[in-house]
Image (cartoon, rainbow, N blue to C red):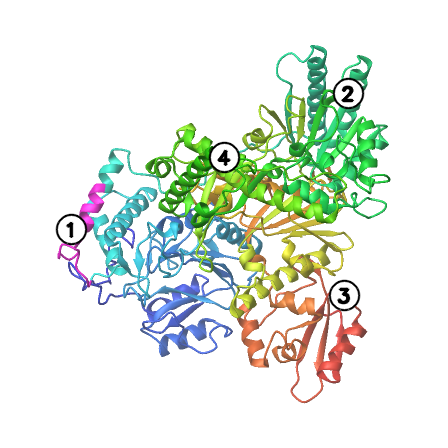
Amino acid sequence: MPKDQAPPDNQTNARGASGRPVGAGHPIFADIAEQLHDNGYAPLPIRPGTKAPAPSRWSSVTIDPAQVARWCEAYPRLGVGMRTGELVGLDIDILDPDQAHHVQAAALARFGETLIRVGQWPKRLLLYRTAEPFAKMSVPGIEVLGAGQQLVAFGIHPRTCAPYAWVTGETPLEVPLDDLPVVDATAMAAFLGEMGAVQPPQLSGSKQRRSGDTLAQNRPTRDSEGRVIDGRDGWLSTIAFHAVHDAVDRNDPLQPDILAYAVWARFAATADLDRSRDNGRPYTLQDAARKVTDKLRLFDERRLPDREAQVSPPNHTPATDSVEAARLKLDAAIADACDRILNWHESEKTGPAPRIGLRATVGLGKTAVSRRHVLALQRGLREKCLPDRVIVFTPSHALAEEAAADWQVDGAKVAVLRGYERAHPVHQTPMCSDLPAVRAAVAAKLRIHETACQDKHGNTCPYFQGCLKQENRKEVAGAEVVVAPYDVLFTGLGIPPDTIALILVDEACWARAVGQTKGLHVETLDSEPLSGLGGGMFRAADAGRMADLQALRVLLRDALVANGPGPVHGHVLRAVGLDAEACRNAADLEQRRCQDPGLRPGLSPQDRKRATAVAHGNARSALNQELWSVLAVLLEAGVECDGRVRVGARDPGTGQSAIVINKLAALHPNLVGKPILHLDATMVPRIAGTVLPGIRVTQIDAAAPHMHITLVAGQFGKSALCNGPRASPVERARRERNLSACVDHVCWHAARVIPGRTLVVTYKAIEAAFGGIPGVEVAHFNGVAGLDGWRNVAQIIVIGRPLPCDTDLNDLAAALFGHDASADRYAKDAVGVWMRNGSHRGVQVLRHGDPLAEDIRAAICDAELIQAIGRGRGVNRTADNPLEVQVLADVALPLVHDRITTWDMEAPDLMQRMLLEGIATDSPGDAAVLHPGMFSSANQAKLALQRSLFKGQIPIRDTYKGLTLKSARYRRAGRGRGWQTAWWIDGNADEVRATLESKLGALAGWKPGDG
């Protein structure tokens, strides 16, 4: 019978039907220590009621038969521990039963069946052995006990007051050390990394459930010792659930009475039974029996849920095409797209224009391939005397200039459409010499050229002749290919629309279409000006219109006050008597308030000032008009809420609540109905379709077998790394430490790949922190798409991810889809990612509960990381020039991963930090002198080395964590000085000796190369 299901022969239980165990027997040191030693273990006597060994220097003393005999005589009746080293303990210190079982199951699947010890269930410890002892390692909730540590094998658990149990039915007394499965440091580190990445937060230890923590909603509440004090009935049910599954897994007979005893024992040891239930009755063994009976019934009916932690496979298929095969597909797809566009023009534009999207892996050369085919399309159109002008849209003016140069090299007559405020690429002065006139036209929502440059009456700007912008307009008018930034998709360009054959959009453009209108406040809606109705001539009808408009404003103010912060709901508008017709009437009245500002080219400063004042008044009216129009659409659609109008929280300073209008710009009328070819490596079809309606997307992916991706899960958000003005001094210090660790990490790995280059992509706010590191180039999120200068880097390290907040996602969902996503929020979820071997692993990431909002999150966050990784052109790498990629973020990217780990496993340790500062040493006293910023004293250095490394023994040969090191043995002058070892990365032995002597004094001995 398994030892966790019934008491062993030498165990007595004074527990009874209720209350906590008060004592139990267990094997004592004198009885079993010699047998354990014969089985290959290193037994240790354990102090009663603790987990601490009784002897001093237990971590370093030789444990031979003579020492065991001495301890048997000195500590005969103590509990029994075992020193780790060749023995390895995998300590699962997790109080969530499902997660603890998941880690155990993963370990057994990877390393093999082994002995399992339980103290405070569901925590457990698994035993393994290693040929080469290694230092301890850990991630939250899981620790690998290594050299110089120990574990309790037999004794009384200090919290449960019950004996430790070996739940497989066997113990180290029956299973020798040599029969345990073999592990090594590399395998254990990989396992810890993967388990740490998938573990939800706050599942280890006795941390309490926090208000608003969605991951903790179904967890019991525990006291400081880990006992369940609230949610006890559910906890008893959980124990029964796992007890039945444990018995099934071991092929034990499903005997209700034995299972009930085991469940009751675990419940009594882990729950507070001193407090009665709500009905006043205490918990008893019969309660456990009822739970067991229920679980067995479900099992017999095949309705007992599976307990395996289910990490769903990734929702994408990993690429299998070689880069050559993918390029052939891409070439064929673009050729087909151009044929369809040619046929559409030849058919006199019968039917809707082709709108074709191609989502192709970064590095396949989609821009170059499309350029070649589009130029051929142009020639075909020109031969048939059909429209042949191509408009190419890029993310920025800078990329537009680069794209234009490429088109020119391929023989196209090309021009870049430059904005009025854009600096001329040669002269480096603004394209327009009268920018105030341009800004006045924009504020008045008037056409810039007719308002600021030249109107139909012959009025011209005084700078018109020789104007760089006018020269640019002429270049654009005569070009066969016009390259422009995305904004022009929505503002239009001054060329005849019937000359346009194709719109080519390179990379995602949807974000440029999204906008917000702000400037109105709930509390002041009814005090907005009413002037302007009637155009300056007051009539009786105008007074009526003013009264009507004012009444409608009052109703709207009352409705929005009743609505409160958040998206505006239709029922609050209808409750005050507003409907779609009333809102459209109000919008019309607001429009009537607008007056001709009289803006025209060549105005004197005084006249422009007066005209601009009128334009600003019109702009105020336009705000109100837009608000009424959007509300009319909401009421007309008959939906309760579309999120397009949102009321902000009351500002404590002004007492006002802002009104936010989320909107989506439409294609300019001159571009509507034209063929579109959209190329984007990270295209989300339903998001792209909001800006480019009717687009049909084809996906072409290539495998990247020589791009090796390591995902490092951890806290790398802005709030962990980027300081802000509202951060407290303590918080600022925490963020600075986190950032410093990331900088050290980059320094280490950059040194590892030198002379190869490293690209770091991170937040703009901390970009400068990585500047000046040898071999490192730095870029920031949303500043890398389309750039090609890093195609040969050896390594890319991405730190963080551009995660939009809940409110931003809600606003974007409203603008893009007319959808209110505010009912859902972010939550942690275990998501699958593909591994190189074809399996998948889980990663804990933030996902939004609303599907549309989650699409937007992925299009902002995941897509930007893929763009960053794509700068290294991983699909084009070979075995001779592989690309290493590290992603330091909690993300599940649609890529194939080679390794998953956590920051706990990857953060630079003390040895690395000393090496990065110049010299590392195994002498705590010398380390304190060499690194005063790291250690305040020799004793603090000694404790830090013992805690972080190998009980003071530094496990270094000729390499350490991928870097080749140089070393020397040295001895300081003076009696009693022993030999120490120094390690360094760069520099020769003479330079290092000189540095040591400048800090430590003259050396009595120096032996380079023996470290």
Residue indicated by mark 2: 388
Please state which amino acid type lies under the numbered disc 3: Asp
Q: CA distance from mark 1 to mark 3?
A: 70 Å
Please state which amino acid type lies under the numbered disc 4: Arg
Q: Earlier in the sequence, mark 4 or mark 3?
A: 4
Residue indicated by mark 4: 539
Direction from residue 848 to residue 504 in the image, left or right: right
Q: CA distance from mark 2 to mark 1?
A: 85 Å
Q: Secondary structure at mark 1?
A: helix
- The answer to whether residue 350 is seen in the rendering is yes
Task: Kindly give the residue lying farthest to the bottom in the view shown.
Answer: 975
Residue 364: where, in percent of width, then height?
Answer: 71, 33
Q: Residue at x 51, y 54 (%)?
A: 192
Please state which amino acid type lies under the numbered disc 1: Gln
Q: Earlier in the sequence, mark 2 or mark 4?
A: 2
Q: Nearer the viewer, mark 2 or mark 4?
A: 4
Above or below — where is 523 with respect to 738? above
Mark 2 closeness class: few <14, some 14–19, many ≥20 residues within 10 Å: many
Q: Quadrant of residue 365?
A: top right
Q: CA distance from mark 4 to mark 1?
A: 89 Å
Residue indicated by mark 3: 986
Q: Tell me if residue 436 is in the magenta stretch.
A: no
Q: Nearer the viewer, mark 2 or mark 1?
A: 2
Q: Nearer the viewer, residue 485 or 22?
A: 485
Q: Secondary structure at mark 4?
A: loop
Q: Secondary structure at mark 2?
A: loop
Q: Nearer the viewer, mark 4 or mark 3?
A: 4
Residue indicated by mark 1: 286
Above or below — where is 947 with respect to 825? below
Count of residue discs: 4
Q: Nearer the viewer, mark 2 or mark 3?
A: 2
